[in-house]
Image (cartoon, helix red, strand yellow):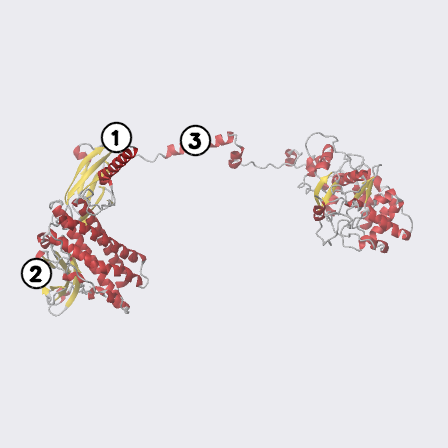
Amino acid sequence: MSTKGASLKGLLLVALLVSHMLLTKEGVTSLPICPNGSVNCQLSLEELFDRAVKLSHYIHFLSSEMFNEFDERYAQGRGFIAKAVNSCHTASLTTPEDKEQAQQIHHEDLLNLILGVLRSWNDPLIHLASEVQRIKEAPETILWKAVEIEEQNKRLLEGMEKIVGRVHSGEVENDIYTPWDGLPSLQLADEDSRLFAFYNLLHCLRRDSHKIDNYLKVLKCRLIHDNNC
Amino acid sequence: DLLQWPQISKCRSPEMETFSCFWTAGNFYNLTVPRILQLLYKKSNEEDWKECPDYITSGQNSCYFNASYTSVWTPYCVQLASKNEVYDKKCFSVDEIVLPDPPVHLNWTLLNTSQTGIHGDIQVRWDPPPTADVRKGWITLEYELQYKEVNETKWKELKPRLSTMVPLYSLKTARDYEIRIRSRQRTSEKFGEFSEILYVSFSQIGIGCDHCTEEVEFPWFLVVVFGVCGLAVTVISIMLSKQPRLKMLIFPPVPVPKIKGIDPDLLKKGKLDEVNSILACHDNYKTQLYIDDLWVEFIELDIEDANEKNRASDTDRLLSEDHLKSDSCLGGKDDDSGRASCYEPDIPETDFSASDTCDATSDSDHFKKAAEKEEDLLCLDRQGNDESLPSLASTDPQRQHRNSQSVNSQPWAPFGDSVESPRPSVHTQISNQNSLTSTDFYAQVSDITPAGRVVLSPGQKSKLGRAQHEGCTEQNFTMDNTYFCEADVKKCIAVTSHEENEPHVQEQGYNEDGYFTTESLTTTVANLGASTAAPLSSETPVADYTSIHIVQSPQGLVLNATALALPDKEFNVSCGYVSTDQLNKIMP
């Protein structure tokens, strides 16, 4: 009899704990741990979008700063701007280029595009973080920003996949992806060419992070706030 | 004027949907045939340069690209050219050149006022620029508000924020304010233009306080008053507190010049005569200090006195008390003045020569002159070696006592009066001796006879040049001091006795070498001590003086080893003094 009572008490305690956990989730400032497939533990779509927008803004902010620092430190006097063809490896992905296009595209397609761009940047960011350390006298700020961007990009990718899983009604298409082949250019022996490759890559990163940030904000305003941010 | 080429001044997009480029024509225009400037543009993925689609909308010397021509994240290049020449070129992408329009519809509302009505809080609201499509989230804007009083020149800035309303706190209701706002894209650095100025006037809504112009200034007067009061209270509390440490810390005691026993007023007045007399006349304190504070620095030798007293009994002279009393001495003076001061280590540097009233003082003078050597004072009897060290004197207890007494009496003699009859004025005798030797300034008082006479040990004797060395050279005397044990002297005397010309009278012996031995008093053989002392002493290096290290008791002194090289001797060999090391070896 005592064991039965004890097990009942234990069960009650567990139930109380779980309910407490669920009830206080609003006060959580950090991402709670939601086991996959768990029905009870779920962030709202609004919350997910909020977090995604924050992350994308942060990534764009870091990319912008990193580019400016690199430009200041290495690109002055080399005429990189004039030479800049700015062919980013993600140019092959047809993304909306203006507001109308962004308004017209379906949100699911836009989400997929976002996912595709993020995935395409996964690889280059890893290599960027490692190769930028080989630049002669690279400032510490550039180094840690590269690492930070790579980490945050992973997190944003996870968040986007969650959103996509939430929003998508049908099958999730995961074939949007552009491979990156710019690694050899980052490892060129000639310093000028190598620095130009970095300059290009950072420029593309700044642009693409801005794109993603914008798309997410558009989606958020559209889906959550009904075009009334 | 300098020649200025046409150049593109800037390209700008207010809302990330359109953009315009502006240029300056330069001063070519006036000089030559007016050239037609063209703006050509090219997207990065295109080959050909195209001409500007709209030269008008944005004003003169501008080119406007509407939404259909604008691709946001596409790189553009524009160039300013005429038919043949390219004057300027710029490459950019539209997302990099976003400079939003200023906000519109600024207004303010009163939140509340302070109780006195002097200050008030307001809320400022505005709308985002109409061109920027913020509602669809296409562009996210940040706003920076600046405000100032109407007659001020410098604007105060608030931090950029995303919201379109901001409160302003603690504005003076008596003053009017100006407010302006500008915006920028959130991740950019550059701001757009400022909005129109918003005027804030409290009097318009009827709460202006015209007479409330006084400003709360920093109450300096109150601060000073309270600070002084607090400090005074603290100081008083510290002074009155019973915590001695705290008091010492904050108010360290100021050392007052004070010689123990001397009235400071005397010193102030500068009457040295009186001071000297006081220092000389401390009868009662002598005894105490003998026991407590024994140290000998030097013994005064009065050379003049020695000449006067021919063959008189030097001992008598030593022991006589006449010279020791000063006319001005106040015997038995009970007050504190001057008594202890003589025995203070740091005192007798003053010039006592001014006073002749006391022999003591004059003696001290001589002492100072002669104060170069310090001889050993105690003679260690070999027999007494095994005994406990504190009794460094001879085995004879009586002698010990006398020794100590004699020793004790030495330093005080110069200052001194006769305190006790047995206390001799050593100085007179010594000075007598010194006149003969002219080098010896010290004499060890080894004993005091029952009659109260002083017996001095033989000391350094190099001047008289005795030849009778041999007998005593056998002895392994410790020549590092100038005194000899009686035993040694005895032996020496015995050896050399045959060489003596005649048994010296004690006094005569004194005259020759100025030293006494204990033996010489008790036996007639002792008078040879002087002669024997000479050879013994002349051979050996002599320590000049030995400082007293420890005062063990009234019966003994422990002396430090001298600076001169002392060959290490065993204790039982040495006759003279015991160094502290030897002492340490012996003592438990």
User: Which residue corresponds to mark 2?
Assistant: B53
Screen quadrant of the C terminus of chain B: top right
Residue B555 versus residue A80 in the image, above or below? above
As shown in the figure, which amino acid type bears the numbered disc 2? Pro
Residue A47 in the image: state x and y as whole percent: 19, 45
- Same chain shared by disc 1 and disc 3: yes
Could you say whether the residue bearing mark 1 is in a helix, strand or loop?
A: loop
Instruction: Report how far apart the C-alphas of labels 1 and 3 lie in the structure.
Output: 31 Å
Q: Residue B450 vs residue B177: left or right?
A: right
Q: Nearer the viewer, mark 2 or mark 1?
A: 2
The numbered mark, 1 or 3, whose residue comes first in the sequence reads: 1
Q: For this view, does B175 lie left or right of residue B457?
A: left
Question: Identity of the amino acid at label 3?
Answer: Cys
User: Which quadrant holds the N terminus of chain B?
Assistant: bottom left
Badge 3, how many Cα within 10 Å: few under 14, some, many 20+? few
Chain letter, disc 1 residue: B
Per the image, label 2 sits on a secondary structure element best described as loop
